[in-house]
Amino acid sequence: MIRNGHGAAGGAERPSPAGRRAVRVWCDGCYDMVHYGHSNQLRQARAMGDYLIVGVHTDEEIAKHKGPPVFTQEERYKMVQAIKWVDEVVPAAPYVTTLETLDKYNCDFCVHGNDITLTVDGRDTYEEVKQAGRYRECKRTQGVSTTDLVGRMLLVTKAHHSSQEMSSEYREYADSFGKCPGGRNPWTGVSQFLQTSQKIIQFASGKEPQPGETVIYVAGAFDLFHIGHVDFLEKVYRLADRPYVIAGLHFDQEVNRYKGKNYPIMNLHERTLSVLACRYVSEVVIGAPYAVTAELLGHFKEPKRRGIFCQIDSGSDLTTDLIVQRIIKNRLEYEARNQKKEAKELAFLEATRQQEMQLVGEGDDFC
């Protein structure tokens, strides 16, 4: 079991030291198909200050610069708000981060991962704040990105979802699609994420249930942690005045047994971090049993009497299956988006390399 941040505000807020103005931090992005990589970026950003404001781009802006988002802007706003390190969400944030935006929200600086974000015409979206010295960088979480997840689902589309044998044509597609110059293929559907005890500690709080708190147990796959999961967990959280929500996550083999096809899209370790980042969850059980037994409840020091089961309607009809169907429906658009993104990044890196070589050459002229 892993204990998480507690309370609707995530238990992550901390007051600024006496006599010092609170440091306000700005992050922005698409936050499409929010995953533990996004959460880890926001966790790192929050640690750099006292108050974290997150700007989320509109569907229109994302479609213009990157391609069609998987989730609607309203879904993405709510997903970001559910991350326990976020203090405030700004809807319809501009795609290019400017000093005007930072000043408008009284932010000292902005934080972004050490990956490249470009506009439709290939410009660095953080160029202005970088030049002004109001830009900080955090480490990107290796092994996951929205592009990676879309790729996993696209590969599942022809072979696994249809239950047909993989054809030679599809095998060639899987081997070559999106392959970068270095030969690494990000579309194999195999996660390169490596779980560590340090990563778990960073996401968890270690708080035990306190006297007077109501312990509530839920369990499931929580695959591709999405707005349906958030709506459900929020309603569970609202069941008590002082809730302590424990989320049990089933083993990958168990999820595959009852979901079939190629599920889960995310492995158990990835799903663990995704759920730990949710402000409504206090503790996670890794590899929870499918059947909820009296012994399991007793382990949580819950009453063993009957009549403690409650069924909650999340109010959302979104499921992991529906997310995959969205991807399948717009398969060609998503493929084009992923390839376009990779091409823009390679062009930007090449342009940067050429500029550096030119500067070196000019320096040699003065020797």
Image (tube, rainbow, N blue to C red):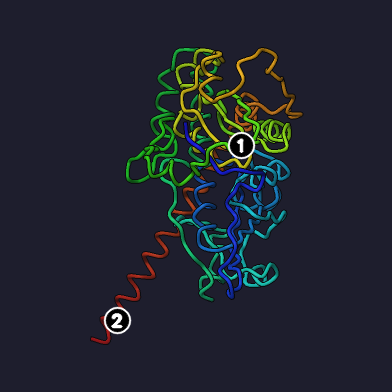
Determine which quarter of the picture holds residue 171.
Answer: top left
Q: Is residue 67 above or below residue 51?
A: above
Which three-letter amino acid code belongs to the residue tagged 2?
Answer: Gly
Q: Are marks 1 and 2 in contact (CB under 8 Å)?
A: no
Residue pointed to by mark 1: 211
Q: Which mark is residue 363?
A: 2
Secondary structure beneath disc 2?
A: helix
- Taking 360 as reference, is 304 above or below it? above
Work out which residue is located at the far front of the displayed protein and give it. 211
Who is closer to the viewer here, 230 or 66? 230
Residue type, label 1: Pro
User: Which residue is situated farthest in the left direction here?
Assistant: 367
- Count of marks placed on residues: 2
- Circle 2 residues within 10 Å: few <14, some 14–19, many ≥20: few
- The quadrant of the rendering that contains the C terminus is bottom left
**Given this view, does label 1 or label 2 mark the residue nearer the observer?**
1
Earlier residue among tags 1 and 2: 1
Q: Is residue 178 left or right of residue 330?
A: left
Determine the secondary structure under disc 1: loop
Up-down relation of residue 272 to residue 113 (above or below):
above
| Residue at the limit of the structure toward the bottom, as seen here | 366
Q: Are there few (<14), some (14-19), or many (20+) residues within 10 Å of tag 1?
A: few
Picture coordinates of residue 283, whole percent (x, y): 54, 34
Q: Residue at x 53, y 60 (%)?
A: 122
Along the viewing direction, whichever of 106 and 198 lies nearer the viewer:
198
- Give the alpha-carbon distance from disc 1 to disc 2, as whole Å: 69 Å
Q: Position of residue 163 (x, y in %)?
A: 51, 12
251 lies above or below 51? above
Residue 63, x across and y down, in percent = 66, 48
Residue 74, percent from left and from top: 73, 44
Q: Residue at x 60, y 68 (%)?
A: 22
Label of residue 136 in the image: none
